[in-house]
Image (cartoon, rainbow, N blue to C red):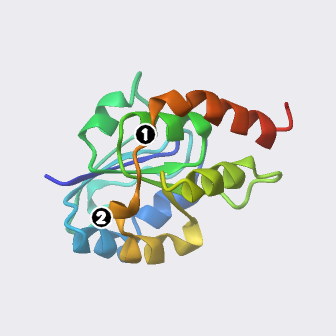
Amino acid sequence: MKTVFVTVGTTRFDELVTSVTSPGAVEALKDHGYEHVVLQVGRGSVLPGPESCQGLKLEAYRFKDSIAEDMRRADLVISHAGAGSCLEALGARKPLLVVVNDKLMDNHQLELAKQLHMESHLLYCTCSSLVETLQTMDLSVLLPFTPGLTKNFANFLDKALGIQ
C-alpha cells in the first residue's frame, strides 16, 4: 500500500494538518497512487479522524517514542521544516516534501528548505501552495542525501542561525 507519512515533529502546525487533509490535497495524493496517510500531529489542536481523507486510509497520532518506523514504511514524507525531521527523512532516503511554516518570524526553516532544494534533496512549499505542489511534484528529480554531507549540513545550519 503506497503510504505518505506526514510529521510536524514536536511543534504545533495545525495549518499543515488541515492542508494535507484538504479535499484538494487528498485528490492529488490519490492521483499519485497513494492509498494510506500516517499523520503525526504533535501539540496541535487538530487530530483528524479516519473520515478526513475520503478515499485514503488515515492513521493520526500525536507522539510516539520514535517515528523511524513510520518513515521507513513511507513512500513519501511530508514534513515541517525542522532540521531534525528533515535530516531523519533524508537519512532514511525517502522522497521529502517540506512544508515551511511561513507564519514564523525570523524563518530559518525557509533558508534550510531552499538550500536543500537547490541541492535537489527535497521539494518545498508553504501550506497555501501544498495542493499545487502535490499535483505537479516529480519525485524522480530528487537526489539522495549523502550521510557524509552531515558536516556540510551542520555548517550550513550554523551559518543560517548566525552561529558561525
Q: Amino acid at mark 1?
A: Ala
Drawn side of residue 54 relative to residue 158, left or right: left
Please determine whether, in this image, residue 25 is positioned above or below residue 63. below
Indicate the quadrant where residue 43 lies.
top right
The residue under the point 43% across, 49% down is 47
The residue under the point 27% across, 55% down is 50
The residue under the point 71% across, 32% down is 155
Residue sticking out furthest to the top:
65
> In the image, residue 97 lies at what x, y percent?
46, 56
Precedes in sequence: disc 1 or disc 2? 2
Is residue 91 or residue 46 the one in the foreground?
91
Drawn side of residue 13 relative to residue 66, left or right: right
Q: Is residue 9 visible?
A: no
> In the image, residue 100 lies at what x, y percent?
61, 57
The residue under the point 27% across, 62% down is 51
Badge 2 marks a residue whose secondary structure is loop
Mark toward the viewer: 1 or 2:
1
Disc 1 crowd rating (10 Å Cα; few below 14, some 14-19, many 20+) is many
Q: Amino acid at mark 2?
A: Cys
Which label sits on residue 89?
1
> In the image, residue 85 lies at what x, y percent?
51, 38
Residue at mark 1 to residue at mark 2: CA–CA distance: 23 Å
Please determine whether, in this image, residue 150 is positioned above or below residue 128. above
Q: Is residue 72 visible?
A: yes
Badge 1 marks a residue whose secondary structure is helix
Is residue 133 or residue 8 the one in the foreground?
133
Pointer 2 residue: 53
> In the image, residue 105 lies at what x, y percent?
81, 53
Disc 2 crowd rating (10 Å Cα; few below 14, some 14-19, many 20+) is many
